[in-house]
Amino acid sequence: MTPESTTIRWEQDDTGIVTLVLDDPHQSANTMNQAFKESIAAVAERAEAEKDSIRGIIYTSAKKTFFAGGDLKDMLKAGPEDAQQAFDTGVAIKNSLRRIETLGKPVVAAINGAALGGGYEIALASHHRIALDAPGSKIGLPEVTLGLLPAGGGVTRTVRLMGIADALLKVLLQGTQYAPRRALENGLVHEVVATREEMLARARAFIEANPESRQPWDMPGYKIPGGTPSHPKFAANLPAFPASLRKQLGGAPYPAPRNILAAAVEGSQVDFETALTIEARYFTELVTGQTAKNMIQAFFFDLQAVNSGANRPRGIEPRQVRRVAVLGAGMMGAGIAYACARAGIEVVLKDVSAEAAAGGKGYSEKLCAKAVAKGRTTQEKADALLARITPTAEAADLAGCDAVIEAVFEDPALKHKVFQEIESVVEPDALLCSNTSTLPITVLAEGVERQSDFIGLHFFSPVDRMPLVEIVKGERTGEEALARAFDLVRQINKTPIVVNDSRGFFTSRVIGRFINEGVAMVGEGIEPASVEQAAAQAGYPAKVLSLMDELTLTLPRRIRAESRQAVEEAGGTWTAHPADAVIDRMVDEFGRTGRSGGAGFYEYGEDGRRGRLWPGLREHFTRPGHRIPFEDMQERMLFSEALDTVRLLEEGVLTSVADANIGSLFGIGFPGWTGGVLQYINGYQGGLPGFVTRARELAERYGERFTPPALLVEKAEKGERFTDAR
Ligand code: NAI
């Protein structure tokens, strides 16, 4: 190692080829930290000084990943006062990469593992990109998913490499992460190889064959592929971008896509160096703002904490499930069977009849056929997946199962009965899980012998696409069962949050607050269309009234009746919600129960397709001209969920801030720009005190339910935030 470069090793062979080995000795992965900034500057300096003895340069890494990207911990801390420093650091790294890129020698990226963000930007600053087809390796610029833009030249170079349209759509705006072969198909890399040796040999071969190599954009007469916005042909297509962006964001406050679009378009009309500066300015604005902090906190740190098992009981050996019994082959059971089989687990899928069970397997057959047709899997793999699912109506076939996941109708007596049928057939220590979405786990556990092995495993629909599973610990659930449930969820590649038993757990209860708030506004006489608009503009993926229709209006009525009974039996007083009367009228007076009933807040076609909002809403509920501030409409939805989440922390149902944030983002569609339901409070203007003041204002205007809970007020007074002390 040269003394001046601590994170990059300079290895020069006797043919004059220099391999720059990225290898930060203080971290498990290479990142764009201060040490890297100094190293890359030193390397660029040395390359220029020793240019005559250099034939070519290869970037590769000694770590498992090629390069991990920016230092996110630093970014979380960057406030407006750090803008200049963030800007300068970015510019310094970019200048160094640019000096190497334009040295006049061939530069190759030998991408030996994941190259996301900064890693792919180093590759982009190389003339030739060779990726090793390592399992799990991903390539791309996912900055947008953290509220950022790739400011190591990522915008400037992808625009020049593939044209504005492809750069935006394939790489920048969605932050797609490509497996090496897909990266090749989409033009992100030039070659994919099977071994490390082959990768380095190909890199050398490129240098031998292209001694004069330069980047396309450094060649005379270069033009951006597909043209730039100043060309009339291109100008005709340009308006499509802001429009598709609006569609993607639904008007929600995500600054990153807007800044990416601006940096790409503006940068395409100026020279390379100016484009880099434009990119840096748009990045600085993002990194010093609140949304990027929210998104980095949630989609990186919280997600990592949740998936790495911060909530899994310590000291219990990890266990893998080999054979799982799925009881009930309806919508959820079929999806759970597919998710388990995809992860390599043998599945016995049981329903009341052989036909019903086979029908459940049919769902996997459909998904597999689609995946094969789209080239996402091979026929061979699909066949193997399907061979792992055995449909049956016989309890005896469940012998040897080391886990059970029940997904029969939402009826406690039926659930008790199906567990009784199978408890003595499966392995004597099999993990016993219920996918109930509303019934208390503690009560369901009373139906089995081994109550300590009984636990809630709440999946979301559609199971194959929803990443979250809410693990619900009953009063008598043991630590061993909790650890095993956690391991099972990770085994099927989903994200587990852990909550204590309570009616509706965390997710079902909190999403109910959002829906109730939307419905209540209709009852107050506000235009239903503007209620829907407010949800969309707040960033919710589903509009509130259409979501109510999907869930069916009879569901909240049933939950209300059960909750009321439970509260009154415990000697408490039941408080009605203003939404209750609206739902009762919709069902009792107008017979509109939601999408499955063919009529709800919306009209539905014969084929079940959603039509317009039911005009009767205006006739029966709307008070013409009645309006409240649009901001109040949005914040009533956001606050109702956030405040109830704080109450769940108070009640001990939730025990972790990361779980609350991740659960709200991945399970119930809380808007991504907030960083999750508790991070929304942290990041609110004025912090917790600002949030408390605003909650009191909403309470005064719209009802007691917005009164801030004691825990929130106390934290605000102490100057604290919602974080997990780890
Ligand atoms: P579903 O009605 O589609 O399926 C239930 C299945 O259970 C049917 O195929 C039925 O034949 C079968 N079944 C009934 N009695 C049985 C028995 N004795 N043995 C074996 N199978 C039997 O219902 P869905 O939507 O799949 O829901 C199942 C469970 O999952 C419920 O507890 C529900 O609350 C819960 N859940 C539902 C979600 C959803 O979005 N639909 C989300 C999360 C949980």
Image: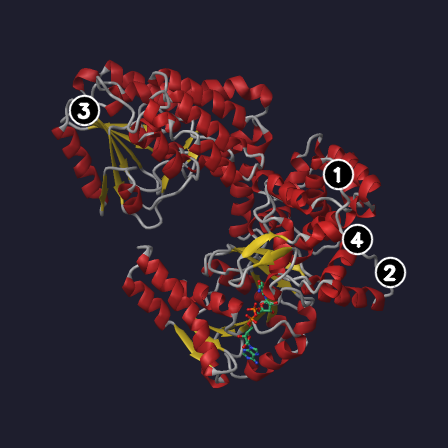
Q: In which quarter of the image is the C terminus?
A: top right
CA gap, disc 4 and disc 2: 16 Å
Please tell me whether residue 327 is drawn above or below residue 155 in the rendered image. below
Please tell me whether residue 39 is drawn above or below residue 120 in the rendered image. above
Kind of residue indicated by mark 1? Arg
Kind of residue indicated by mark 4? Pro
Q: Name the spot of residue 27 as percent of width and height, x first.
A: 43, 36
Please tell me whether residue 676 is drawn above or below residue 54 in the rendered image. below
Q: Which of marks 3 and 4 is in front?
A: 4
Q: Nearer the viewer, mark 1 or mark 2?
A: 1
Assign a secondary structure to mark 2.
loop
Q: In which quarter of the image is residue 676?
A: top right
Q: Quadrant of the N terminus?
A: top left
Q: Name the residue under label 1.
A: 627
Q: Nearer the viewer, mark 1 or mark 4?
A: 1
- On residue 3, the disc is none
Q: Which of marks 1 and 3 is in front?
A: 1
Q: Name the residue under label 3.
A: 213
Q: Residue at x 64, y 50 (%)?
A: 544
Q: Mark 2 points at which residue?
A: 573
Badge 3 density bin: few <14, some 14–19, many ≥20, Cα 10 Å: some
CA gap, disc 2 and disc 3: 78 Å
Q: Residue furthest top?
A: 49
Badge 1 density bin: few <14, some 14–19, many ≥20, Cα 10 Å: some
Mark earlier in primary sequence (4, 2): 2
- On residue 578, the disc is 4
User: Is 556 left or right of 120, judged from the image as shown?
Assistant: right
Q: Nearer the viewer, residue 476 or 692?
A: 692
Q: Nearer the viewer, residue 386 or 422?
A: 386
Confirm if mark 4 falls within 8 A of ligand 1: no
Mark earlier in primary sequence (2, 3): 3
Kind of residue indicated by mark 3? Ser
